[in-house]
Amino acid sequence: MADDFLRQRGWRNFAQVPIANAAVNVAVGDNSIDVRTDRGGYIDVRVKNTGLAPGWHEVMLRSPESQPTKAPIQVIDDAQTFGLISDIDDTIISTWLPRLLIAAWNSFVVTEQARQSVPGMARMYQQVLAEHPGAPTVYVSTGAWNTYPFLRRFIKRHGYPAGTMLLTDWGPTNTGWFRSGPDHKRRALRELARDLPQVRWLLVGDDGQHDPMLYREFADLQPEHVRAIAIRQLTMAQQVLAHGTTTVLGDPNHVQYQPTQVPEVRAPDGDALAPRVRAALELEQPQH
């Protein structure tokens, strides 16, 4: 079965029929709530924790429209003050996204076995989290929810820490053909800061798109929620494939809200980033 998954081509992730507006019962421990799926067949709901201990658990989902299924959730300890937020494309997976043709080839044609991990990144994550037992890992990406099963298998196969994934819907919106990646990441960062106000995050991304600008913006606005920023540097060839030029993208509309003292480090892979990240995390950052 595992070999079948490795040979599975990406288009199969999208060959699913969503069930919109379906009634679903979500059971969390001794508590349950009735909800309905959105237009893409997904559930986005907050459920009160009725006593689950910190760590990973499973919730049961039941619907008359499909077979019962389980979904993993992570409960974060109120005393936990450190967390890791990671981009996916070109940060842990070498996909050269989001240039349209390359994205389509990687998403629909290439087999899972051919998707490569960025050297050293899994090792760096393991080292960082070893110093912070129980710390949450959150993967934030503009990839579609349809790719969630593949991403879970990829993360496990390459030794990345299990974590929550915040992905996007596939298809057009009311204002355009594609969803705004920067807006999705901005919203995810804001919601994580709101829901886990005690956590200060290590933000990891790459310089192929907007991660440096978005992370600095978040650190400017809410420095009390950021420990450090780590950026994987793409080669010139990867920059061209990512956005069509050899230089790192900038944002002329980005406004520096206040001088930030959040440390930022950059390197081309996880092994080169690791010592710089450790040094950055050791810096004492003022509380606001």
Image (tube, grey):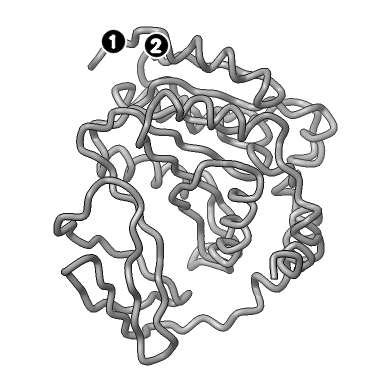
The type of residue carrying mark 1 is Pro
Front position in the image: 197 or 171:
197
Where residue 286 is drawn, which disc sits there?
A: 1
Instruction: Mark 1 or mark 2: name the one nearer the start of the chain.
Output: 2
Q: Quadrant of the C terminus?
A: top left
Residue, disc 2: 261
User: Quick one: SS at disc 2?
Assistant: loop
Asked whether the residues under the numbered discs 1 and 2 touch, taking CB atoms below 8 Å apart as contact, a structural biologist would say yes
Residue drawn at the location 21% of the way across and 65% of the way down: 29
Residue drawn at the location 14% of the way across and 59% of the way down: 50
User: Quick one: SS at disc 1?
Assistant: loop
Determine which quarter of the picture holds residue 206: top right
Residue drawn at the location 71% of the way across and 23% of the way down: 268
Measuring from the top left, give residue 218's x and y in whole percent: 40, 30
Measuring from the top left, give residue 205's x and y in whole percent: 57, 33
Question: In the figure, is residue 245 to the left or right of 286?
Answer: right
Residue drawn at the location 32% of the way across and 45% of the way down: 191
Front position in the image: 133 or 274:
133
Measuring from the top left, give residue 130's x and y in whole percent: 45, 27
Residue count near mark 2 (Cα–Cα under 10 Å), binned few <14, some 14–19, many ≥20: some
The type of residue carrying mark 2 is Gln
Residue reaching furthest to the bottom: 64
Question: In the figure, is residue 7 to the left or right of 184?
Answer: right
Up/down of 67 relative to 266, above or below: below
